[in-house]
Structures are given as C-alpha cells and as structure tokens.
Image: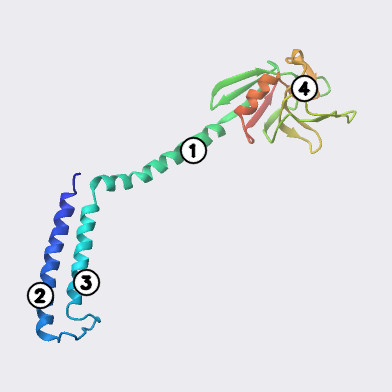
C-alpha cells in the first residue's frame, strides 16, 4: 500500500527530535533528582521518559494509518451527499415546472413542463348554464375513488365503478361549498361533449395517468 511520503518524513523527524529530548530529560533527571522524588508534574524519575516514549509510539502509529486513499475517501463524502441533494432539488424543481392548460374549445387538457407539451387528454366540459369557470387556479384537492353529491338533488353516490366521479378526483376550484375539477366517468362515450356541471370529465385510464403525473399546487389555466 502506498504511503504518504511527506507525512512519513515529518513523523520520522518528530520521532528523532522527541527521542533526543527524551534522552536529555532522562540525563538531567538522573543527575539532579533522587530515585523516588517526584517532579513538578507528579512524575517519578522514569515516568517522564515512559510518557514521552508512549507519545512517540502514538505519533508513529498515526503516520502509518494516514494513507492518501483514506484521505481521498473521506473528502469525497461531501460531494456525494451534495450530488444526492442536488438530484432531489432537481426533481422537485421539475415537478414545480409543470402546469395544466385546459382549452375549452378543443375540449382537451394539455400538460406542460416549462414550454413543452408532455401529455394531452380529451375532456368533457360544463354544459350551458353550468359552464366551466375560466381563469388561473391550482390543484388543491386530490382523491382516489371519490364519492359524489349531486349539486341539485343532494343525492350521494358512493365510490365504485358506477360513481359519476369515476376513479380519481383532481379539484382546482371551489366557492366554499361546491368544487370543480378533473374526474373520471363511467360514461366514457360522453367525454368530449358539454355534459357536466362545470367539471372536466375524463376517461378513467386518462385520469389515472394525470393523477400520477401531477401534485398539489400545480397551476391550472382554463381558457376558451
């Protein structure tokens, strides 16, 4: 295994200097202090030498364990972590760049990422007297297999294959009581016609795809 030569030379120099200091200190203690006397640090005559030798051994071991490859591995952890964080940030940014454009005249909804259409689905729109509201909104409610209450009769339809809302609900408008959004339908042959109470009806397979492609907060622009 390749060693870090400059670091090894520094460690060897420290060992050499420490050894000289150790011998000098040993000689001075031997000539000036009785065998059992303690110095100002609380060491007996031989204890300072033992202590310094221990420190020398620790420095040598440190030099042997510091390898260029271990330093490189430790320094590479931060870039790897930053790379993961950057990928997550890019994913969130890509989701935030999506928007839905509803063209009532085409009776289609277009999904954009930035300025590129990445998906398009046919829709049924609001009938006369129940026109789909025009404007800019955002997705505020998403639900799988929703129940539905008729806005006139108040009758409640349970979730299931016969529910007028189909398999998915994506709400983007509310007056505090009623909501309008994208939803599926058991009557897929009516998609593309002005048949709803303002909602945008979709075939169940299409609304399932749309549900997976967006999230809460995605802008929805409805235009003629």
In front here: 151 or 208? 208
Badge number at residue 161: 4
Q: Earlier in the sequence, mark 2 or mark 1?
A: 2
The mark lying in front, picked from 3 and 4, is: 3
Instruction: Report, in whole angstroms, how far the alpha carbon at label 2 lies from the one at label 1.
Output: 61 Å
Instruction: Report, in whole angstroms, how far the alpha carbon at label 3 lies from the one at label 2.
Output: 14 Å
In front here: 125 or 36? 36
- Secondary structure type for disc 3: helix
The mark lying in front, picked from 2 and 1, is: 2
Crowding at dot 2, Cα within 10 Å, few <14 / some 14-19 / many 20+, comes out as: few
Question: Which quadrant of the view contains residue 170?
Answer: top right
Residue name at image x 72 percent, y 25 percent:
167
Specify whether residue 101 is in view: no
Instruction: Report, in whole angstroms, how far the alpha carbon at label 4 lies from the one at label 2.
Output: 95 Å
Q: Which residue is mark 1?
A: 88
Residue 163 place in picture, x, y as percent: 79, 24
The mark lying in front, picked from 1 and 3, is: 3
Q: Which residue is mark 3?
A: 51
Considering the image in quadrants, where does the C terminus appear? top right
């Amino acid at each position: 295994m390749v060693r870090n030569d400059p670091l090894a030379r520094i460690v060897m120099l420290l060992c050499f200097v420490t050894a000289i200091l150790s011998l000098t200190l040993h000689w001075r203690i031997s000539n000036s202090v009785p065998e059992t006397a303690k110095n100002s640090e609380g060491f007996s005559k031989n204890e300072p030498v033992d202590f310094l030798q221990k420190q020398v051994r620790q420095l040598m071991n440190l030099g042997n364990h510091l390898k260029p490859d271990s330093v490189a591995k430790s320094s590479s952890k931060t870039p790897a972590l930053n790379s993961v964080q950057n990928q997550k940030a890019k994913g969130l940014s890509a989701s935030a760049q999506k928007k839905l454009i509803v063209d009532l005249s085409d009776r289609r909804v277009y999904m954009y990422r930035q300025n590129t259409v990445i998906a398009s689905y046919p829709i049924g729109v609001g009938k006369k007297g129940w026109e789909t509201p025009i404007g800019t909104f955002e997705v505020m409610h998403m639900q799988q297999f929703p129940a539905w209450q008729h806005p006139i009769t108040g009758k409640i339809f349970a979730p299931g294959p016969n529910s007028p809302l189909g398999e998915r609900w994506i709400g983007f408008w509310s007056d505090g009581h009623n909501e309008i959004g994208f939803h599926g339908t058991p009557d897929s042959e009516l998609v593309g016609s002005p048949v709803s109470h303002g909602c945008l009806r979709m075939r169940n397979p299409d609304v399932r795809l749309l549900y997976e492609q967006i999230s809460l907060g995605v802008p929805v622009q409805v235009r003629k």
